[in-house]
Amino acid sequence: MTVKITLLGTGDTTGTPLVGCTCPVCSEAATSGRGRLRTSLLVEHDGFKLLIDTSPDLRQQLLRVGAPHIDAVLWTHGHYDHFAGFNDFYRVQKYPPGYGAPPEVVAYMQEQFHFIRFAPPTRRNRMSRSRWGGLRITLGGAVNHPPAPTYGLLIEDGDTRIGYTADTNPDIPQRTKNLLDGCDLFFADALFPDGIMHPKHMNYSEAIALAGELHAKDFRLVHLSHKIGWDAPHIGYDGDTFVL
């Protein structure tokens, strides 16, 4: 069987074009219709559909890929641009079960969506094959996105390994690096171009260096700000699909 990954969005918390911005990247986006919705991934395997994070653009993202029924949601951390779209399931389908690690992530989601009557998310660091469409998903690779507890993840189907760092600076624990080493496809947070340092995120060169350190066979950079140009090598684009 194969795993299909679709990048529903590749932008940072403001998206691209940035409202009111006239920089070259935003101007090209405004005139061409090109853009970056907030970062979210769709994972499909044997009919099972999993969302990694539910961005504020979720409604538009799901419409773009044919409005599929979502079987589960996995949250990497509790920041607005990674969870706020969850309520877009209202009147569309039954709210899918949501998972996250550690317990603080799930507890935060329950607090944010207190007005929704659905079974509370449960914590699972290592999801069973039977519940996740044959995929083995490890969510427990802590990354460094202060002050929020934030986690990377590994998706496995037989010998195929797909990794995602979620939002992080370069100071990732060695245990997480070991988990994500040798991925066939790796997604990394790369908020800014070279020369701009951020305490919570990697810039372009830092993300590429991490992919090299982790011996990724292929990789794409996501969670991109409007300061990253449209032709930068290795960046992901909204709508990109990967079949492994």
Image: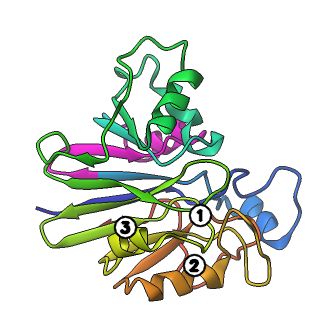
Residue at left 35%, top 22%? 93
Across and down, in percent, residue 68 comes to: 33, 38
Residue at left 54%, top 15%? 114
Across and down, in percent, residue 52 comes to: 42, 48
Across and down, in percent, residue 158 comes to: 12, 67
Please state, as top left, top right, bottom left or bottom right, where the N terminus lies in the image. bottom left
Please state, as top left, top right, bottom left or bottom right, where the C terminus lies in the image. bottom left
Q: Earlier in the sequence, mark 3 or mark 2?
A: 3
Q: Earlier in the sequence, mark 2 or mark 1?
A: 1
Please say if 53 is above or below 178.
Answer: above
User: Which numbered dot is residue 168?
Assistant: 1
Q: Nearer the viewer, mark 2 or mark 1?
A: 1
Please say if 45 is above or below 122.
Answer: below
Q: Indicate the amino acid at tag 2.
A: Ala
The residue that mark 3 highlights is: 163
Residue at left 46%, top 88%? 212
Please say if 125 is above or below 229.
Answer: above
Between the C-alphas of marks 3 and 1, the distance is 14 Å
Using the image as rendered, state which of residue 44 and residue 122 is in the foreground: 122
Instruction: Magenta stretch: give its range.
Output: 44-68
Judge whether residue 122 is colored magenta: no
Between the C-alphas of marks 3 and 2, the distance is 13 Å
The residue that mark 2 highlights is: 207
